Amino acid sequence: MAALAPIQPGLRAGPSVERPALRDPWWFRASLLGACALFLIAVLALPLAAVLVEAFRRGIGPAMKAWSDPDTKAAAWLTLRTAAWVVPLNAAFGIAAGYALGKFRFRGRTLLIALIDLPLSVSPVIAGMLFVLLFGAQGWFGPWLRDHGIKILFAPTGIVLATLFVTFPIVARELIAVMEARGRDQEEAALSLGAGAWTTFRRVTLPSARWALLHGIVLCNARAMGDFGAVSVVSGHIRGETNTLPLHIEVLYGEYQFQAAFAVAFLLILMAVVTIVLKHWFELRAASGAAEELA
Amino acid sequence: MTRIVLDKVSKAFRSNKILSELSLELESGHLVALLGPSGSGKTTLLRSIAGLEALDSGAIRFDQRDVTHTAANARGVGFVFQHYALFEHMSVHENIAFGLRCKPRSARPAAAEIDARVRELLELVQLPELGSRRPDQLSGGQKQRIALARALAIKPEVLLLDEPFGALDARVRRDLRSWLRGLHDRVSATSLFVTHDQVEALEIADSIVVLREGRIEQIGAPAELYRAPASFFVFQFLGECNTFVLDGNSEHPRIRSLSASEMGQQPAGAAWLGCARPHDMQISTEGVKETGLSGVVSRVHAAGPTVRLELNVGSAKALLVDLSHAEFSAKMPRPGETWFARPRAMQTYAVG
């Protein structure tokens, strides 16, 4: 049963050979699979179906109306804009961190890796609070920012900053793992062949981690578009101005516009589906890129 | 061709001395083996020559050119890694062309010229049809040959190989090493390869450098080294051996085997150790008191070019005796029987 084979992401699976010795009794396999299926239905399929049903309960018309609402458009635009800032910045940061931490050993390396993981372990709300503490009217830099007419909190800048913070480990972690696993042999080979540091990085290091990078970017994008907690704290919920799609959905829901809320939620889910399809494709490429070229 | 000179090179990792004031000259055009147990500093030495490791002190010269502080990418050294280190995202062709395509624009050959050179190298390593493959579609032996072609593309004067066959099957290994010898004779480079396999070193090298704890234990041509190992360490490292303690005076030495408590340390009271290869042992039913050892045959292994006997002489290690099949059939020693053994030829080393 392939379903119960150990999952080893990133490794190429051999031809799936039935291994009788490792085969569990049918009732055990069936109950495990059943439990999995039930769980998935309860927490994934049913809620998704509910969103779909609610969004189109009264046909496509009202859904279209919700989508063409200026506030929705503004929210979608802000979400995309935020992602457009956050993803390249975090990709660049992730590449730098992956290269430095994955390929080199130095004092303080473990500490740095732990710090990079920090945003994943603190609640997004706390991440948002940090920015309020720094840039809020009563915050450290608040008065200075006010004097110079710079608006960070309750403005797109703050949203971008908060999203950056929340998503910044994603690409980095992915690349650190891959680059560490690859080791430095290929770089040393390039060096001995006369390549300079930049050529080595551009033509050897980066291409050999390209699928991990794309995978990280896709995940980072998903998180950047979907984050609620941190963004909610710094955004100020100004309709049509500082509401991202997740915040907008919450506002609509709070105003009992269920149908519109679900219609917008459907938009966000659509973005997520595109992301997941891309992610899956990249994983396949990463795992079996070579195998498929063999054919 | 280039003569490589190492002048008192030292290297330590933290307080751990890897190379201590090691000096060495390698004849231009030679194929030299760096032989030593793991931790003897042989890989560090090789990487230092390539510029992949920085020395703490000492100098490295290629002919008259001091390269001690030259960056790895400016040394013009070909390096072959134990685990191939092929660029996985490039085709075989692109791998081999890499060094040429990296050259500064002024020194870079035209694209057509690069292609021709790659094809020539593929011919040289006898894999002309594999140019469009990816590295992960190659076998280990093929990968290493491509890695060699890639290193040779830049026409290095110095070719360094770090355990080039270490990751391969015994059989592929054997084929590749005689092939490497042939290849070396056709390209004009001074080659240095690291190995911990004495058979490999003895078989293909022009000369062998035996390393031990960051120092040179002995340098010499293979035959010379095998005939006269300069130390007990080299003797042991070059092949299987039986070790004895020699007691008594020099005219009438008494020979006895090492007892279990004497293994790995200096035998008390003895001034000399004797070493003999298994094929330099002879057996008889009659013992000679001073120079013979008696033991019970514990194992007979006749499936090979010679017959191997293991004789349990009461020491920690069984005595190894190799007999020709003719001698074996004449004497017919069987497991469980008691036989006397003594060395036909023996090297002696002072203890300490």
Image (spheres, coloured by chain):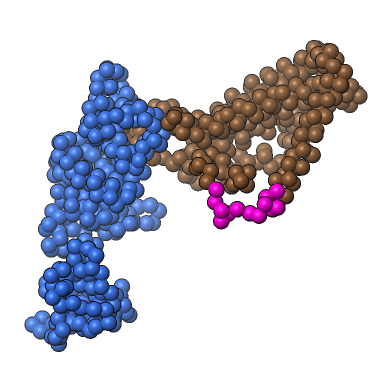
Chain colours: A brown, B blue
Along the line of sight, the residue nearer the viewer: B71 or A231:
A231
B104 shown above or below B158: above
In this figure, what is the number of numbered marks?
A: 0
A140 shown above or below B227: above
Q: Is residue B231 magenta?
A: no
Visible residue check, residue A279: yes
The quarter of the image holding the N terminus of chain B is top left
Specify whether B289 is left or right of A142: left
Q: Is residue A24 magenta?
A: yes
Q: x, y (%) of residue B315?
A: 29, 80
The quarter of the picture where residue A245 lies is top right
Visible residue check, residue B278: no
The quarter of the image holding the C terminus of chain B is bottom left
Along the line of sight, the residue nearer the viewer: B3 or B296:
B296
Q: Residue at 32% of width from left, 30% of height from top?
A: B130
- The magenta stretch spans which residues? A18-30
